[in-house]
Amino acid sequence: MNPSGAAPIKLLIADDHPVVRDGLSSMFARDPEFEVLGEAADGAEAVRLVQALKPDVVLMDLRMPGMDGVTAITELARRGVAVRVLVLTTYDTDSHVLPAIEAGATGYLLKDAPRDELLRAVRAAAEGRAVLAPAVAARLMSRVRQPSPAGPLSQRELEVLELV
């Protein structure tokens, strides 16, 4: 139990860099509001661990060997696994942001986010609220104002924009 009396938010961390996993695990372990259940080095391991450990939130990197983050998010949704996925990555380009959101990510943060922002984002994701880094939100807004030649926004993009 954390000081508020609520059960801690259970986390799974999926990133192919051990130092990133260790840093995130240590950061969350210091806060009684969170409990790190496990770590995954790739998307396939993340899918297996989500099903076995049943975390509330997965912090998911996008670029991992084997099964990447977007594929893992897609696979979790295909299997009907009820987990919130918060993408935590260094990439904020359309080619990374939009597929992750369309696959079902609850939020999208960049790895340079301050600690407090990351903690708030995980709390929000656990509650089912959409979380977007300011740069990502600005990118989506720009996309709405100037639709790409490929056509208008998808239904999922519109849903995400409404949540922002």
Image (cartoon, rainbow, N blue to C red):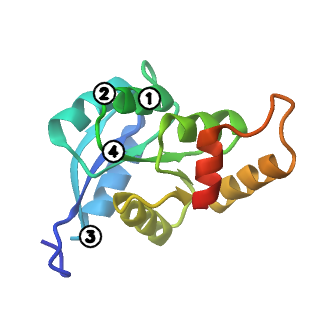
Residue at figure coordinates x 49%, y 48% from the top left: 88
Question: Which x, y percent locates residue 164?
Answer: 61, 61
Mark 2 to mark 1: distance in Å? 9 Å
| Residue 7 drawn above or below residue 80 | below
Q: Which residue is mark 2?
A: 79
CB-based contact (under 8 Å), mark 2 and mark 3 = no
Neighbor class of circle 4 (other Cα within 10 Å; few <14, some 14-19, many 20+) is many
Q: Which residue is mark 4?
A: 13
Disc with the residue nearer the chain's start (2 vs 4):
4
Neighbor class of circle 2 (other Cα within 10 Å; few <14, some 14-19, many 20+) is few
Which amino acid does the dot numbered 3 rest on?
Answer: Asp
Q: Secondary structure at mark 4?
A: strand
Mark 1 to mark 3: distance in Å? 30 Å
Disc with the residue nearer the chain's start (4 vs 3):
4
**Residue at the limit of the structure toward the front, as seen here:** 155
Question: Which x, y percent locates residue 97?
Answer: 62, 41
Mark 4 to mark 1: distance in Å? 17 Å
Residue at figure coordinates x 62%, y 40% from the top left: 155
Neighbor class of circle 3 (other Cα within 10 Å; few <14, some 14-19, many 20+) is few
